[in-house]
Image (cartoon, helix red, strand yellow):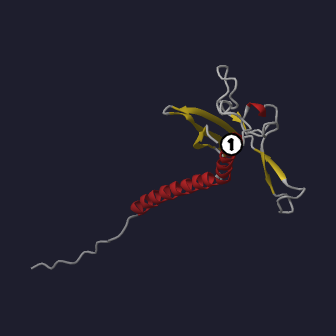
Amino acid sequence: MRQRTASHVAKGFTLLETMIALVVLGVGILGLAAMLGDSIAYMQGSQSDFIAQQKAEQTVEAIFTAKYTNSITWAQVSGFSLANPQGLFFTTPQPMLQPGPDGLLGSVNDVGTPPDFILQPGPDGKLGTADDIQVPLSNFTRTIAITNVLTDPNLRNITVTINYTTGRFQRQYVLNTLISAFD
């Protein structure tokens, strides 16, 4: 009888298998790093998101205040055009400007006013002091669309759209509300 000798078979990974695993792992880590970079870049726009929301709300509140204090008529709460010269609001995207003499944001009376801005604390770190910094909202546009509600002639839909650029991202904030002809 012949005796068989136990052969020792090496068990484990070869160098080639290890290199392939490292390449796959490296591709995965690079993908995660790229995603993290994009996430951080997108999140840095949160201040601009907040500004867009506040400017849209400020626009609608100014329209409500003017209408309900009888500063403007129901006919003026509409889009300006050759067909409707009484309307106070441009229907195309407009730069964010300071309010004109009527006090309304985004109205036809804003033409020629300086750009709107936000204030940030200056070197002393306190808001409301002489060294505050004015940051112009030059990368923001505002569109005010006012349409009649077909089922009720005494209601109009106001849509304020704020378009802005933050980093490499184009963003948009839209606020919809209704306004009534009644006080």
Left or right of 79 in this view: 102? right
Disc 1 element: helix
Q: Can you give x and y, in whole percent of width and height, for residue 89 in the image?
A: 68, 32
Q: Quadrant of residue 176?
A: top right
Image quarter (top left, top right, bottom left or bottom right) of the N terminus = bottom left
| Quadrant of residue 67 within the rendered picture | top right
**Quadrant occupied by the C terminus:** top right
Please identify the quarter of the rendering in which residue 81 is found: top right
Q: Nearer the viewer, residue 95 or 147?
A: 147
The residue under the point 67% across, 38% down is 142
- How many numbered discs sit on the rendered protein? 1
Q: Is residue 84 above or below residue 123?
A: above
Q: Which residue is mark 1?
A: 68
Furthest-left residue in this view: 1
Instruction: Point out residue 137 in the picture as x, y percentages from the top left corner.
Output: 74, 43
Of residue 60 and residue 52, the one placed in the foreground of this image is: 60
x then y, percent, for residue 99? 78, 39
Query: Looking at the picture, how far across and down is residue 24, in whole percent?
Result: 44, 57
Image position of 172 with respect to 2: above or below: above
Q: Residue sitting at 73 percent across and 39 percent down?
A: 105
Which residue lies most toward the top here?
Answer: 82
Residue 174 appears left or right of 112: left
> Toward the viewer: 67 or 4?
67
Residue nearest the viewer, comparing 5 with 166: 166
**Which residue is farthest right?**
130
What amino acid is labelled 1 in the image? Answer: Tyr
Q: Residue at x 58, y 54 (%)?
A: 39
For disc 1, the neighbor class at 10 Å (few under 14, some 14 to 19, many from 20) is some
